[in-house]
Amino acid sequence: SQQGCDPFAQTQRSKLQHRRARINQQINKEMRMRAGAENLFRATSNHKVKETVALELSYVNSNLQLLKEELEELNSSVDVYQNDSESISVPMIPLGLKETKELDLLQPLKDFISEHYGEEGVLFEKEIKEFMELRQAMRTPSRNEAGLELLMEYYNQLCFLDSRFFPPTKTLGVFFHWYDSLTGVPSHQRALAFEKGSVLFNLGALHTQIGARQDRASLPGLNHAIDAFQKAAGAFNYLKENFSNAPSLDMSAASLTMLVRLMVAQVQECVFEKMTLLRAHNDFMAHLQLAQEAARVEDVYSLVHQTMSQPHVKDYVPFSWTAMVHVKSEHFKALSHYFAAVALCDCPAPSDAELLEQEKAFLQFHVTMPEGPSLRVLLQDPEERRKLGKAHLKKAIMKHEEAMRIHGLCKILRKMDILQEVLSFAHKRSLSKYSEIDHEEDFFETGEAPDIHPKTHQKPEIKSPNFSQVKVTDLFHRLGPLSVFSAKNKWYPARRVHLMRGENGFGFTLRGDSPVLIAGVIPGGCAAEAGLKEGDYIISVNGKDCKWSKHAEVVQLLKSTGKEGVDIGVITLQGSECPKAADRKAAAMSSGVRENKENSRKSLMNSKSASTLLVWSKKSKRSKKSTYSGVPFTAVGDNEAM
């Protein structure tokens, strides 16, 4: 079975995660104290007690403030997650994993198995323990493909658990506890969707950590980073589209929108870095492209900055994130103007053959047309090119300075040497280019350079999690095929029927596989007299469990019985009467995280494990790709008369 990381191994990252866990617990404690003090404050009429409690409350609140600041600093320890290569890459923002509390499911699941399935719960202790070990392991996933698979495996098992043990109208009565990744505040709910959503969040967070640790000075490293951030965006987006009513801020729609946009921006930044690795030196077109890529990065980071600055988001996003995103949008704007200047000043004027292509590219390069001569004249006149280049550099230098100013305002970013280095390197490079093309006898006033039109050659993709890549077998598949033996179905207690073969056989016809269904009962035959009904499922023949048996196997077992007859175990599903009003009311009251079930069906369908074959015979609108398009029964023509 899969393992998590050793939680005691002292890597930099696990130390962070330990500190995070410690702070989470302290926040939890202070919040309990605050709740107690507030209750006492409301309940007491004694003036002196009120004063003491008010003082206590102010202590608790300031402690909470300090703890939240400490957590914020942790969330900003971006450098721990970066790679160790010598080259300078701008740091990326990774997310810390959500922490959870221990969960003991042994008794609740055993009780449910005996009440709902009529089986002895004690016989399933091994499976329950295996499930709990898997949950324990997924709390500390390793930062690589194996860690991602571990989270996927657990998520897929949760889909099975949902179908087996969570009927639509009641819960198991266990609480799932998870801490908010950004604020450290604990939340708990009985809804399994909260557990599933939190695991999805961690899948996204783990992708961000894998993305941030790549060595982006090489092409393979960049491609891995792009892939990781696209998958992180996909996980957060999937969570946003399929789960609602989350009790914690980090999983609110506003927060997830912000995280998706942040990941898309980080992908766009990697695409720009890829272009700089691949570009041809002194090539006019390549430099125009770089300038437009940089403008695109600036564009997406400005959007992230706006999203982070919204009233209900800015209170819990770490200030250092907002500052870093703001710094990056200014930095990339500066770079777009720098590369425009390099294209104009360092690249030779076009030959007649190149002129048309360059003119066409330059037509769509600026947001508004630069003042002065026509593009054709400009491109062929070195002096005009220098003038416009100088205007671009002037703007670049202003933006570099703005980026450095914002960087200096954030205490946490000031400690980040790498970012400081990148900003000052870019600033100096623009300054030296400016002094190189600046002539002392320049008497013209440097004009205002228009901004560069953003354009990218590789649009970021939001890659949804592909749950089917991790195949799992339903741990509880001994309970029988999910098409029948699920939490939402109810059936009457199993009956044992003894049949003797008459002249015309047993007097019934069979249909389908796992479990085999009695399709018809011949009036007056042995089966009818023994009380078998059309629609009964055969679950055993002569004591042999047949829940998973194929049609042919059951037919064989029945045919091979002698004069002594056969014992058949059957169950009858309780009618699909319309749900009772009380059930409907209970369903309406079961609040908590809501999950759009269509998609969890899809993920179950795709995991092709032994017991999903017959799960969802109803075609979901979107499961065009699903492997089984609804084959719960073999065609009626295969009816076998017994």
Image: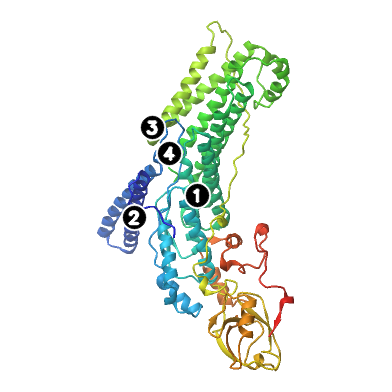
Sequence-earlier tag: 4 or 1 = 4
Sequence-earlier tag: 3 or 2 = 2
Q: Dot 4 corresponds to which residue?
A: 82
Return the residue found at the far right: 637
Q: Secondary structure at mark 2?
A: helix
Q: Is residue 87 above or below residue 78?
A: above
Sequence-earlier tag: 3 or 1 = 1
Q: Is residue 302 above or below residue 35?
A: above
Q: Dot 1 corresponds to which residue?
A: 204
- At label 3, the amino acid type is Arg
Q: Dot 3 corresponds to which residue?
A: 414
Residue 358 place in picture, x, y as percent:
69, 21
Q: Secondary structure at mark 4?
A: loop
Q: Secondary structure at mark 3?
A: helix
Residue 20 place in picture, x, y as percent:
36, 49
For marks 4 and 1, give the one nearer the viewer. 4
